[in-house]
């Protein structure tokens, strides 16, 4: 997993085997499988809570990588309600939201993944993957 610093264009969303994990499914990490849109290779990622990912703010801060509009129009994130704005202006499932860059293990196509992690309600901790999208650098 890596951060993305150059401007990108989002492409097609990849097929993810499972995108919502709760409580014990999250400890110590989550195994995510997604299918490459280009070569159909099944890629395997590990997301470790509090270790994996980069703040989503890095993507839309000063429109460096993507604009807020691009993120919203592609259903990557939603606008956060006023009562949860401390998690950021744009979130997934109104929880702290992170992203990561990765590549297909087989054909090296570029992908960006976005997920949230946190306590949704007392006793319910969730890791919710918004999606994994192909991208092209500009």
Image (cartoon, rainbow, N blue to C red):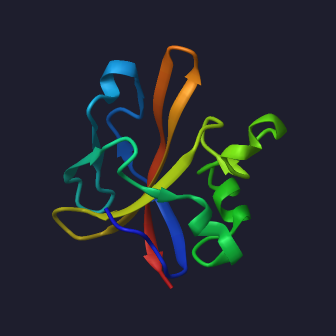
Horizontal and vertical percent position of residue 91: 64, 46
Horizontal and vertical percent position of residue 74: 62, 55
The answer to whether 44 appears left or right of 122 in the picture is left
The answer to whether 84 appears left or right of 74 in the picture is right
Whether 103 is drawn above or below 113: the answer is below
Q: Which residue is at the front of the view, 83 or 2?
A: 83
Residue under the point 30% across and 46% down: 34
Whether 44 is drawn above or below 103: the answer is above
Residue under the point 32% across and 20% down: 24
Q: For residue 53, what is the image quadrant?
A: bottom left
Q: Residue furthest bottom?
A: 138
Whether 26 is drawn above or below 11: the answer is above
Number of on-image labels: 0
Residue under the point 40% across and 45% down: 50
Q: Residue furthest right?
A: 82
Residue 79 in sight in this render? no
Horizontal and vertical percent position of residue 10: 52, 66
Q: Residue furthest left?
A: 106
Horizontal and vertical percent position of residue 82: 83, 40
Q: Quadrant of the N terminus?
A: bottom left
Q: Which residue is at the front of the view, 83 or 110?
A: 83
Residue 90 in sight in this render? yes
Q: For residue 4, what is the image quadrant?
A: bottom left
Q: Residue furthest top?
A: 123
Whether 138 is drawn above or below 95: the answer is below
Q: Which residue is at the front of the view, 136 or 52?
A: 52
């Amino acid at each position: 997993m890596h951060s993305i610093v150059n401007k990108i264009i989002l492409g097609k969303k990849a097929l993810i085997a499972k995108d919502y994990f709760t409580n014990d499914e999250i400890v110590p990490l989550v195994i995510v499988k997604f299918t490459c849109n280009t070569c159909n290779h099944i890629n395997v990622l590990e997301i470790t809570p509090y270790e994996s990912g980069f703040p989503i703010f890095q993507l839309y801060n000063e429109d460096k990588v993507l604009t807020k509009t691009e993120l919203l129009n592609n259903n990557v994130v939603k606008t956060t309600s006023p009562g949860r704005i401390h998690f950021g202006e744009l979130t997934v499932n109104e929880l702290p939201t992170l992203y990561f860059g990765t590549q297909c293990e087989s054909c090296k196509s570029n992908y960006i993944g976005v997920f949230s992690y946190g306590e949704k309600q007392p006793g319910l901790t969730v890791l919710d993957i918004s999606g994994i999208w192909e991208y092209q650098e500009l």
